[in-house]
Amino acid sequence: MTSTFEIVAEPTRRRILDDMRDSERSVGELVERLRLSQPGVSKHLRVLREAGLVEVRRDAQRRLYRVRTEPLEVTSLFAALGLGLLVVGGALSLAWSGRLP
């Protein structure tokens, strides 16, 4: 299982999340605004959606994506505290980096 930290560490995914920070966007809008390929944007949105970082809604023929802030707030809090999330044997646990920020 890929951690939220690893998913958000990918620069293109951070650009997509940053662009959707204030409003929802369609794939076409993201392609145009970020100058990325449509298949690339769709792939990154799928990863972000499966991780619970974005959600999608249908609007007629379009799918509009928006950021889910709750998982990102928790991830930011853990990072600020020098903590990471680990999955060990199917159980979620915290790991301290050994240093404070």
Image (tube, grey):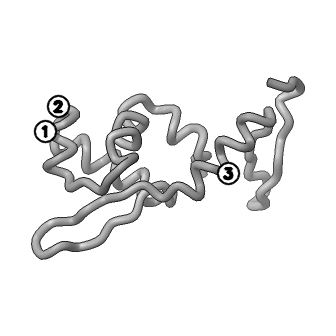
**How far across and down, in percent of the image, does residue 11 sit?**
42, 29
Q: Please give left or right for residue 2 compared with residue 10 in the image.
A: right
**Which residue is located at x 43 percent, y 52 percent?**
48
Seen from the viewer's position, the closer of residues 20 and 63 is 20
Contact, mark 1 vs mark 2 (Cβ under 8 Å): yes
Q: Which image quarter: residue 31?
A: top left
- Report which residue position mark 3 lands on: 74
Dot 3 crowding, Cα within 10 Å, few <14, some 14–19, many 20+: few
Q: Earlier in the sequence, mark 3 or mark 2?
A: 2
Residue 89 versus residue 7: which sits nearer the camera?
7
Instruction: Name the secondary structure under disc 2.
Output: loop
* Residue at image point 20% right, 55% down: 26
The residue positioned farthest toward the left in the image shown:
61
Q: Of helix, strand and loop, which one carries label 1?
A: helix
Name the residue rendered at 71%, 36% in the picture: 79
Q: Earlier in the sequence, mark 1 or mark 3?
A: 1
Spot occupied by residue 93 in the image (x, y as percentages of width and height): 82, 52
Please give the residue where the numbered disc 2 appears in the rendered image: 35
Which amino acid type is marked by label 3? Val
The residue carrying mark 1 is: 32
Q: Amino acid at mark 1?
A: Glu
